[in-house]
Amino acid sequence: MGALVTLDLPDDSPLLGLPWIITVGPLADPAEWEPVVCGPYERPHALALAEAVVADEQLMAVVEPLLPALSAEEIRGEVAAAQLAADDEAAGIEAADLYGDFDQVLDEQDDGPGESWATATVGAPSPEPPPVPTEEQVRAGFGRIAGLLRER
């Protein structure tokens, strides 16, 4: 039984339409072997494939969007945004009172309009997993992703 980690996004998030990648690595010791990165896939295909891979093994799969940046400036902007978000989160946790304000920090993290990460232990009782896409379905998804990247 492995673990699947992905962003928990609202239904109208623009990230849902991006290509997604799967990073699979060991669940216990990250130094055990180098993670494997696969993709890009459409999000439903990435989730179904990742779930199928980790269902019976001690693996962790991270499914995340692939941001098709066209310039170094775009990449720097994404890095700066990620750093700012991490700094804001760290400042909120540092400012939390040991006996009372930490719940408020957690509530803000859970209820915020932005993205959050969701982790599921595969093999635990949960809704029916999505069907694993066929090779033909994945190839058709590659074609749609290529079209999206050409439009960008």
Image (cartoon, rainbow, N blue to C red):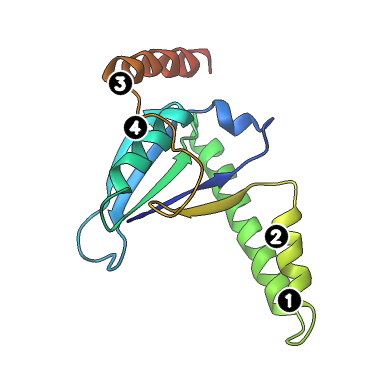
The mark nearer the N terminus, 4 or 1, is 4
Q: What residue type is disc 2 on?
A: Gln
Residue at x 63% of width, y 29% of height: 14
The disc at residue 102 is 1
Q: How many marks?
A: 4
Q: Amino acid at mark 4?
A: Gly
Q: Is residue 34 left or right of residue 125?
A: left
> Pointer 4 and pointer 1: residues touching (CB < 8 Å)?
no
Residue 2 or 71: which is nearer the viewer?
A: 2
Type of the residue with mark 3: Thr
Mark 2 / mark 4, whichever is N-terminal: 4
Q: Position of residue 128 (x, y in %)?
A: 47, 38
Q: How packed is label 4: few (under 14 Cα within 10 Å), some, or many (20 or more)? A: some
Q: Taking 104 as reference, is 57 left or right?
A: left
Which residue is labeled 3 in the image?
134
Residue marked by disc 2: 109
Q: CA distance from mark 1 to mark 2?
A: 11 Å
Q: Residue at x 77, y 84 (%)?
A: 97
**Badge 1 vs badge 3, beta-carbon distance below 8 Å:** no
- Residue 76 is situated, as x and y percent measured from the top left of the image, at 54, 44
Q: Secondary structure at mark 1?
A: helix
